Image: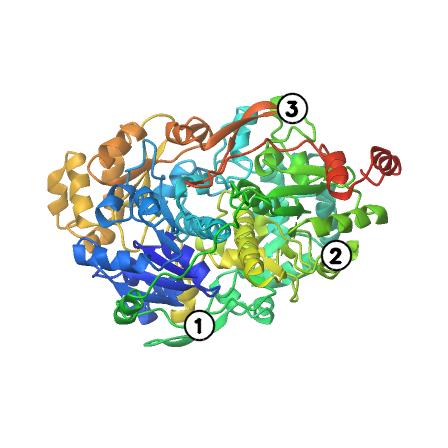
Amino acid sequence: MTVVECGEGVSSAFATKLIADLGADVIKVEPPRGDWTRRRGPFPNNIVDPEKSGLFIYLNANKRSVELDLTSKRGRDALRMILDRADILVHNVAPSKRDAIGLDGEKLARELPTLVSVGISPFGNIGPYRDWRAYELNVVNAGGWAFLSPGGSPYSELPPLKTFGHQGDLQGGVHGALVALAAHFHRVRTGQGQAVEVSQQECIATELEMNLMHYTYAGQETSRLGMRLLAPWKIMETADGYILGACVEEEQWRRCVEFMGNPEWTREEIFKDRLARGANADAFYLFLEEWIRPWKTQALYHEAQARRIPFSAVNNMRDLYADKHLAERRFFVDFTQPGIGTFKMPGQPSRYGAEGWSLRKPAPRLGEHNAEVLKESESRRAAVAKTEKGAAAPKLPLEGVRVLDFTWAWAGPFCTLQLAHLGAEVIRIESEKRLCISRGIPPYADAAPGVNRAGYFNQYNQGKKSITLDLANPKAVEIALELAPHCDVVAENFAAGVMERLGLGYGKIRAKRPDIVMISMSGFGQSGPLKSYVSYGSTAAASAGFYALSGYQGLGPSEIGTSYPDPNAGIFGALAVMAAILHRNRTGQGQYIDQSQVETALAMLPEGLLEFAFNGTQPARNGNRDRWMAPHNTYKAAGDADKWVSIAVGSEDEWRAMCSAMGQPRLADDPKFVNVASRKANEDALDAIVTEWTKTRDRWDITRTLQAVGVAAFPSLSNKDLASDPHMRERGFMVEMEHPEVGRRIHAGIPWKMSATPCTVRSAAPQRGVDTDAVLSDLLGYTSAQIEKLRAEGVLS
C-alpha cells in the first residue's frame, strides 16, 4: 500500500503514522520550510532543532519525506506524478486552499478515479463554518469537550479546560486512518476510489459520553462545574502524590469500607448509598481524604485493587516509564533517531496476532527522499482489483461483513458503532440477567426508566441488532459458537479472561471459523501483572497520565470532563479490526487482537512521554496556554456566568489582525507584546487585556469578528449548543431516527462523509432482544418451535 500525506501538523500525520506502522509505504510531502511539528518539540536538552522534535519523530517514523512547493506548478506536477501511483492520499489542507494546490477531493475523484483521498479539517468541507480557522484549542471547544472539563470543578471563575496535548487533532487522525482503510477495502473489492472528508469537531462531539443525551433526552445543560452525583469519585492527595478513588458500583464501596476497617462514620445515613454520598460530598470527603492522606500512592493503589476496588494512581511520566506492567508487555520500544541516539518510544496501541506492527526506520530529514520517490513516480501505477463481472458492487465499505458483538458499557459499543456506521451488520449479544450498564444509566427519555429508554445506550448502539442469550447457560454458549461461522468479526470488552471462562475464548471461536478476526478490549490487556485490575475510562485516564498533565496553572491534577479513554479505545479498536479485515482479504488469515485501554490512551500523549524520555522532566500543567502561541486561552464573554470563547493566535500576522479587530492596532507594537516571546513573557497582562475586550461582547460576535480577519476563535459549546448548532444541522451530523419507545430524539451521527459509499445511521438503537428470532432463524435455521422451547428453558434471556 502506498500512502501520500500532505499538509502540516498533527491530524494527517497521525492518520498516516497509524497506517505506516502497519507496513504501508508513506510518502510525506512537506513544504520548503518543513512541517511545523519539526519546530514544536519536545527537544533533547530543550535545544530547538527541527531534526530532533519529539512530536515530529513520533508522528513520522517509518515515512519518507519529499520537499515540494505546492504553490508552484513544478511542485504540483511532481505531486500529481506521486499521486498517480498511490493508493491513498491523506491531507489536512484547509478546504479553501485545496483547489489552488491540486487537492480538491471532487476533482481528484474525477481525474484519479481509483485514488482514495481523505481530507481532515476542523469543520469539514461543507457548512457555515467550512472556512473558519481553528487550532486544537478551538476544536475541543467547538466539539463540546472543553465545556465539560475539568470534571467536578469548584472553580466557576476559571475557563473551560483543554486536555493536554493535541487530542482534537489526534482524534481527527485516528478517524481519518479508519475511514482511509475502509475506503481502501471498498477500492480493493471494486476498483473504485473516492473522496472522504473528516470533521474534527464532529469526531469530538461523538465522544461526549452521555452529555449530549442529557439535553436531548432530559433537557439538562451539563457542564464541568459542581460535584459528581455519586461518590466516591475524586482525585485525592496522598503522602507522595495523588490517587483517583472511584466506586461506581455499591459493592465496590462496601469492599472499600471493609478495607478501611469499617469506620463508624461510614454507617451514617447521609452516606448510605452512592447518591447520598454524592449529595453530601463535602462531609464525605472530609472523612475519606483523612484516611487516604497518610498512604503512599502506589501502595494504596495496589492494596485497593487487590480487593477489586477501582482506585487508580494518578501517574506521571516517570511512573509510566518505570511501570512493571508496561515493561512486561513491552509497550515502550527502543528507538534510534540519528542525532539523538536511542530512547524509549511509545509502542503499538493494539497488539495484532499477525506480525506486522513495527517501528522500522527513523523519522526522515526534510526532503531526504526526493530523488528516489520522484524516480519511482515515473513508473506505471500498480493494478487495482476489480469486482468480478456480474457481481453487485457493495454500497457501503463494510457491506457483507458481520460482527458478533459481546461488548458492553462504552468502549466496546463505541468500537462496534464505527463498524456499523461503515456498513457492517452488528449483532449484539445481550442478557436480561446481566443488563448492559449503559441501559441502566440516566438520562431516560421523559425521565421514565426502562431498558430501551436510556440515552446512553441509544447513542452508542445505533444501527445494530440485539439478541438475548444467557451465557451462564451452556446451551446459550453453544448457540453463540454456532453463530461464529456466520460472522467475520467477534468483539468483546469484558475483563481479561472472562470470555475464556465462558467457553468463548479465541481458541473455541477459531475452531468454528479459522479465519475469524477477534478483538478483546480490556483496561490493561490480556497479559501482564495488572491484567485483572478493575478499570473504567476515568481510571485509565489517571493510569495513563492524562490527569497529571492536565490542569490549571498552580493547581493540582484535573479530571478531563469525560471518560475519554473509553471512546479512544473504541475508535482504535475499530481501526485494528479494519486493518485485520484487510489483512485477511489479502492473506486468508484471521487473527486475535489484544487491546489495552491504557495503552491506546498512552498513544495520545507523545509530547508528555517524550519530554520525559529526552529530558527526564514532566511537563507542567499550564491550563489552556501553549508553549509556542499567545494569546492562547478561553476567555469570558458577555452573557451568563458560563459563556466563553476560545482564541488562538499562531503567527505575527494573526496577532496584528487581532489587534486591529479589537480596535487596538497599536497594541501589536507594544514592546511587551511585539512578538511571541514577549507575549509569552507577559501572558498574564495579555490575557487581562483580551478579557477586557471579550467580557462585554457576545461570544458569537467575537468569533465572527475574529474569523473575518483570519484569527482562530470559537465559542465553548455546551450540549445544548451542540444540539441546535446550525453548522452540524446543515451537515446532517445530528440525526433523529424513529425509536419504538422514545420516539425521535437527537443523537450524534457520523463524523465523516464518503463520496462513493455515503454512510448513514441506518436505524435507531435496538430494543433489547428484538432481533433474537430473526437472527436464529435466518442464520441458524431454527424453527419457531425450537426458538420458543429455548425461550421457555431460559436460554434466550
The residue that mark 2 highlights is 512
Q: Position of residue 155 (x, y in %)?
A: 44, 39
Residue 495 showing in the rendered view: yes
Q: Give the image quarter of residue 370.
A: bottom left
The label on residue 734 is none
The label on residue 360 is 1
Q: Which one is in front in this view, the residue at disc 2 or the one at disc 1?
A: 2
Q: Which comes before the other along the chain, label 2 or label 1?
A: 1
Q: Which comes before the other along the chain, label 3 or label 2?
A: 2
The residue that mark 3 highlights is 740
Q: What distance separates the C-alpha of mark 3 from that of mark 1?
A: 52 Å
Residue type at mark 2 is Lys
Q: Which comes before the other along the chain, label 3 or label 1?
A: 1
Name which residue lies at 29% across and 38% down. Answer: 713
Q: Give the image quarter of residue 668.
A: top left
Name which residue lies at 37% across and 58% down. Answer: 86
Count every numbered label the image shows and give the total.
3
**Pick the front one: 310 or 653:** 653
Residue 145 showing in the rendered view: no
Q: Position of residue 356 (x, y in %)?
A: 53, 67
Q: Secondary structure at mark 2?
A: helix
Q: What distance separates the C-alpha of mark 2 from that of mark 1?
A: 35 Å
Question: Which quarter of the rendering shows the C terminus?
Answer: top right
